[in-house]
């Protein structure tokens, strides 16, 4: 899903999943530097701030909405594409 961040801002996405399912997530920045954070449904950190060009693939420890926060480090709006599959 293509999207755009505000200058220096963040976009959040909620992904519904069950514990044990495998999340495969890729972010394709279309401009400047970005990073992302993954949070479990209870708010705990699943993955600390990671460069947007580094994909994540792994089993989910909790059922519910996994929060993906994509953060731009640029002072101009940034386009990006979020590619997600949950198996």
Image (spheres, rainbow, N blue to C red):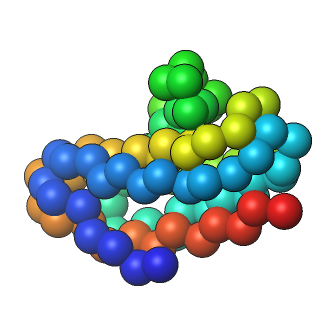
Of residues 82 and 35, the one nearer the viewer is: 82
Q: In this view, does 28 lie above or below 9?
A: below
Residue at the (40%, 70%) spot, across then down: 80
The single residue placed furthest to the top in the displayed view is: 44
Q: Is residue 11 left or right of residue 43?
A: left
Residue at the (27%, 70%) spot, across then down: 4
Q: Is residue 47 above or below residue 24?
A: above
Q: In which quarter of the image is residue 87?
A: bottom right
Residue at the (34%, 73%) spot, across then down: 3
Q: Is residue 3 left or right of residue 67?
A: left
Q: Position of residue 82 (x, y in %)?
A: 51, 68
* Figure label count: 0
Q: In this view, does 86 lie to the left or right of 45?
A: right
Q: Position of residue 21 (x, y in %)?
A: 84, 50
Of residues 64 and 46, the one nearer the viewer is: 64
Of residues 6 and 1, the one nearer the viewer is: 1
């Amino acid at each position: 899903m293509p999207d755009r961040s505000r200058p220096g801002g963040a976009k959040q996405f909620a992904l519904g999943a069950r514990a044990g399912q495998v999340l495969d997530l890729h972010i394709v920045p279309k401009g400047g530097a970005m990073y992302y954070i993954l949070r479990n449904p209870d708010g705990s950190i699943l993955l600390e701030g990671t460069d947007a060009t580094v994909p994540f693939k792994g089993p989910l420890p909790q059922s519910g909405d996994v929060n993906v926060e994509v953060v731009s480090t640029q002072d101009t709006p940034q386009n990006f594409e979020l590619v997600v599959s949950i198996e």
